[in-house]
Image (cartoon, rainbow, N blue to C red):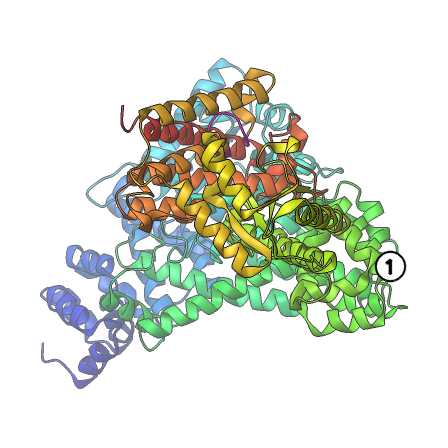
Amino acid sequence: MSAPPELGRAIAEAPDPELARVALARVLEHPVAREAFEHEAVRRVGVRLLGFSRTATDLLVRHPEEAWALADVGARGRAELEVELAGDLDRFGPAAGLRRFRRRAMLRIAARDLAGADVDSVVAEITRVADACLEAAVRLAGEGLAVIALGKLGGGELNYASDVDVLFVHAEAGAGSQERSERLAAEVIRLLAEPTDEGIALRVDPTLRPGGRSGPLSRSLAAMLAYYERDSATWERQALIKARAAAGDRRLAAAFLEGVAPLVWPAHLEPAAIDEVRRTKLRLEEYVRLRGKELVEVKRGRGGIRDVEFAVQLLQIVHGRRDPALRGPGTLEALDALAAEGYVAEADAAALADAYRFLRRLEHRLQLVRDLQTHDLPADRRSRDVLARSLGLADADALVAELDRTTGLVRELHERLFYRPLLEAFAGPTAPRPGVDRAATEELLAGLGFAAPARGYELLARIVDPATRIGKVLAHLFPVIAPPLALGADPDAALVRLDRVAGALDARAADLLASDPLLARRLAHVVAASSFATDLLAARPDRLEALARGGGDAQAALVGVVARIASRELSPRETGAALADVADRVVREAVDRAAPPLPFAVIGLGKLGARELNVASDLDLVFVYEGEGPEDLEAAVRCAERVLAEIRAAGWEPDADLRPEGRSGPLARSLAGFLEYWQRYADPWEFQALLRARAVAGDEELGRRFERLAEELAYPPQGIGRERVAAMRRMRARIERERVRPPEAARFHFKLGHGSLADVQFAVELALLRHGGPDPSVRSRSTLEAIERLAEHGRLAPGTARDLGEAFVFLSDVKNALEIDRRLHAEALPVSPQEQTVLARRLGYEAYPRQAFLHDYVRITRRARRAMERVFHEQE
């Protein structure tokens, strides 16, 4: 065949011109295919197809006569497809006929798809092809079954390589009918899914049936309805949202769908219904994240296809019970209905639909290449360039940019779909609107996790009351503040606290919020997480500015840190440092007000010295002065007492018990007095405490001298010997034995128990005492920094360093999460399952929060205890 000029242009315009050239050479070896490609209609779509899909090339090489199918790639209706399939069954027999029909149909659809067909028509025809195959297989197997479509088949939105999710239902009960029906169902699956030389017709998947893989392939109508009414899990009923009749006995299918409708759309919305959808989504996200594909998988990755589908399904579950117009099985169909009925803003629905269509087109392109169930972007640049050209984009960079834009938009719209309707309900042009609108809004509040949606409605109506300036501002900011409230540990309490703060804010505070969305978001996180910080804000609304810009008094600074902790903007290391900054300021201001009459410095020990404070930490302090004689001592003690009183007045709890002689010793001591005590009387643990000594306030030179002296004494030049190690080990065991009651509580005492922060502290301090004298480069007051330095210099094994560091970060996070609400000391996990669930949610666990958190806690603390044991046994 002499190649016409049009063929060269078509090859150049193919997504992969080189692939098109090679594929054409293979296909055109057969005269039937050559004749077909001489026709412009075939050539126009065929070259582009061969320049992208190896599956298409393989089909045309094996069956060159199928090239004529490309002469007309227009969409076919169900009846037209069934006529075509009937002809194939007559010519090739059941198994081969089903497969040849499906492959030819996919060839046509793929060619039309690559030529620019809209994704709605593509998925609709792929679904019609599957329906036709199922109908034919049921007729071939024998009468008596209804095939119920679920998943993408049920939604009328199959892709090229989708599994076909089905249920089989038969009419009559009884052993004979059951056995026959299961045999028929098995034959339907065999006809469609058994591999042959022509591949398979459909990937039939019946595992969503009652009982899963171990359940019978078919059940009678009565048995099906009884199962879904009495024994089904929430997710099984939710799967029926997409149920429709696909093939077989239509009257039987209609009876099944009518029977399960009250179960799918119950009069009362169970909280578990929403939780199940969220948990399923989060499990998928976690699976994808652990595989390292969060940003490259278009189906289950961040902002991917499942984000759209789950968002729409959640809104269907929330509102579809009252509004039958929302019960359509298709994602785009349901999204259109949600917009038409006013549950979703039309602009949001349109933007989400466009994003969904782009992601589905991208998914189709990925599967067209080999007819494989893949959803991952290829890693290499050339493959991405080809993929981009198939979508009409310039190159790989343009593809990645468009995907990033689309997934970011989906994530944003995912939230807005839920929170914008609340805004419209309270702040729309006709708000507030009673009756149906209120009922829908209360449903949405329940779906978002509010236990008392009616009370929540009343509070929200007051908070965004347009009669007040703050109400207007908060209404405008509602999409920003609603997610933190709904995702908080106790959404109802968060709403009450927001109401308190809003009632105290003046016009200036309203202007600040209006001009700074970050301020509004942090405010929402504060009221969602912390009672004590809410109290501080309600008492002094001028502290609001500190949430975003800093400034204000020390209490305002503390509220600002709490806001950043609650919004999880700070890592545990940053949290400790930020709290230490506030505490340092409190101590400095206390010293300034005490006005010491002699050189006087405040030294931080423990967590304050290490800059690793938790929300409710005490401030471990000692006081040093420069002077001689009883008069100077008396003056220094008076000054120390004044400093302690000022710190308490500022809302912090100082602790000076780590001073020489503890509570029996003088509150302040001269630097010479400290030195004498250390050289003559100090116990080993007191030198261990000096590892974290840091000058916090007062005379800077005196503070630096104390730090140098403390460091010199804390780190023995030659390290420590076995005796000291044994003493530290006995001390660690005694602390756990005497201070953790009852003993069996040690497993969940994260401060002093098994694998606790104390285990991490003792292991790190022992390693510092061993190696910090001979090697000053490993020294650090910070636990995490010390772990990093010790590992970097080979003083801690990498696994040990990892386990200690992970435990410190995790347990510090746990401690802060327990203390952030009321700022009360927390040393052990709460006992009640409800409180453990609240803690887990505050830590960011959403999928089975309590179970997932406890699993992590046991795993991490077990590793921490073993890591501590390894450190202690290093020289044994």
| Most foreground residue, 726 or 298 | 726
Is 396 contained in the magenta span?
no
Residue 769 location in percent, x, y?
Answer: 37, 37
Residue type at numbered disc 1: Gly
Q: Position of residue 851 (x, y in %)?
A: 54, 31
Residue 163 in sight from this viewpoint: no
Relative horizontal placement of residue 701, taking residue 866 as reference (left or right)? right
Relative vertical location of residue 286 with respect to residue 479 in this rendering, above or below = above
323 horizontally vs 754: left or right: right
Residue 713 appears in view: yes
* Overall secondary structure of the magenta section: loop
The quadrant in which the C terminus is found is top left
Q: Residue at x 35, y 44 (%)?
A: 202
Q: Relative to residue 507, is residue 582 depicted above or below?
A: above
Q: Which residues are magenta?
A: 750-757
Q: Residue at x 27, y 47 (%)?
A: 793
In the image, what residue occupies the spot 50% across and 39% down?
A: 676
Most foreground residue, 238 or 737: 737
Callout 1: helix, strand or loop?
helix
Residue of label 1: 503
The answer to whether 119 is drawn above or below residue 62 in the figure is below
Q: Residue at x 42, y 66 (%)?
A: 403
The x and y percentages for residue 784 are 43, 46
**Residue in the foreground of this view, choosing between 503 and 713:** 713
Q: Residue furthest front?
A: 629
Choose between 506 and 705: the one closer to the eye: 705
Q: Residue furthest right?
A: 467
Residue placed farthest to the top in the image? 175
Residue neighbourhood size for the residue with mark 1, other residues' Cα within 10 Å, grouped as few (<14), some (14–19), many (≥20):
some
Q: Residue 667: percent from the left, percent from the top?
A: 66, 41
Which image quarter: residue 106?
bottom left
Q: Is residue 756 magenta?
A: yes
